[in-house]
Image (cartoon, rainbow, N blue to C red):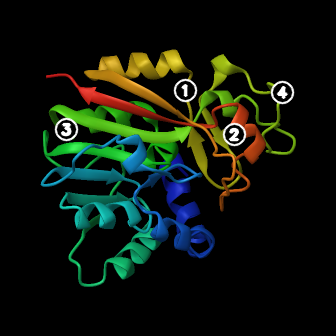
Amino acid sequence: MSYSARNRAFWNSTSDAYQAVHGATLRQAPLAWGVWRVPESELRILGDVTGRRVLELGCGAAQWTLALRVLGARAVGIDLSERQLAHARRAAGSAGARLAQADAERLPFAGETFDIVFCDHGAIVFAEPEPTVAEASRVLRPGGRFAFCMSTPFRDTCIDPSSGTVTDRLSAGYFELSHVEDGGSVEYQRPYGAWIRLFRAHGFLVDDLVELQAPPDGTSTYADFVPAPWARRWPAEHIWNLRRAV
């Protein structure tokens, strides 16, 4: 079974449980980043989305996509999992949100269709980075924005392989970061230099790398992702904020 097929099967089997645990929080704070839900109004990653053509990669139940449409964006959400999209369509109701089942490694859109492509712990985690970044570049107009939030290499090198938990010790080899198979899903990571070379190869300029810090009083439904004290000392998540060169 391919990694893509494995991840599709994983999300189809876990979507209901995932939405039961996290869905209410995601609906209450849809325009927010990462496991600590840092508000977009504070970070201003996407900017003014009014009238902009926006694509969310790995939309899940489409909390981001639906909230962006309320702000006036022409937002589209895609996901590999039909079960996740069932939750999205139920949330959208009669709002007419554009949702589609698609693989981020092979997007079903013409070139230069979107002004913004983004994801928040979405497809960029569960799709191979090389074709996904290439596809994001292809469907973006020149000057368009590509932003995504995901785990940092810093966190991923501190995962104890015997327990799967994040510790304050380096465990994994940094230069060997590639993909992790946990028996269910397959997740991807690259060293920082590899990310930057990949971006440059597809015409992206790095405008910012926003390293997220857990707030002192922060709580998260993603308790297994990283302990709060750890994420207050070291960056467990970051947002790459990129612009396609003109």
What type is the residue that disc 3 sits on?
Leu
Disc 2/disc 4 C-alpha distance (Å): 14 Å
| Number of the front mark, 4 or 3 | 4
Closer to the N terminus: mark 4 or mark 3?
Answer: 3
**One can see residue 168 in this view:** yes
Q: Tell whether 46 sits left or right of 24.
A: left
Q: Residue at x 80, y 44 (%)?
A: 165
Q: Tell whether 20 sits left or right of 210.
A: right
Residue denoted by label 4: 169
Residue denoted by label 1: 190
Looking at the image, residue 170 lies above or below residue 95: above
Q: Residue at x 13, y 45 (%)?
A: 113
Closer to the N terminus: mark 3 or mark 1?
Answer: 3
**One can see residue 108 in this view:** no
Provide residue 5's location: percent of width, then percent of height: 50, 55
| Number of the front mark, 2 or 1 | 2
Residue denoted by label 3: 140
**Disc 1 vs disc 4: Cβ atoms closer than 8 Å?**
no
Q: Residues within 10 Å of mark 1 (few under 14, many from 20)?
A: some
Closer to the N terminus: mark 2 or mark 1?
Answer: 1
Disc 2/disc 3 C-alpha distance (Å): 33 Å
**Disc 2 vs disc 1: Cβ atoms closer than 8 Å?**
no
Residue denoted by label 2: 231
Provide residue 50's location: percent of width, then percent of height: 16, 54
Disc 2/disc 1 C-alpha distance (Å): 20 Å
Q: Residue at x 66, y 62 (%)?
A: 221
Q: How many marks?
A: 4
Disc 1, SS: loop
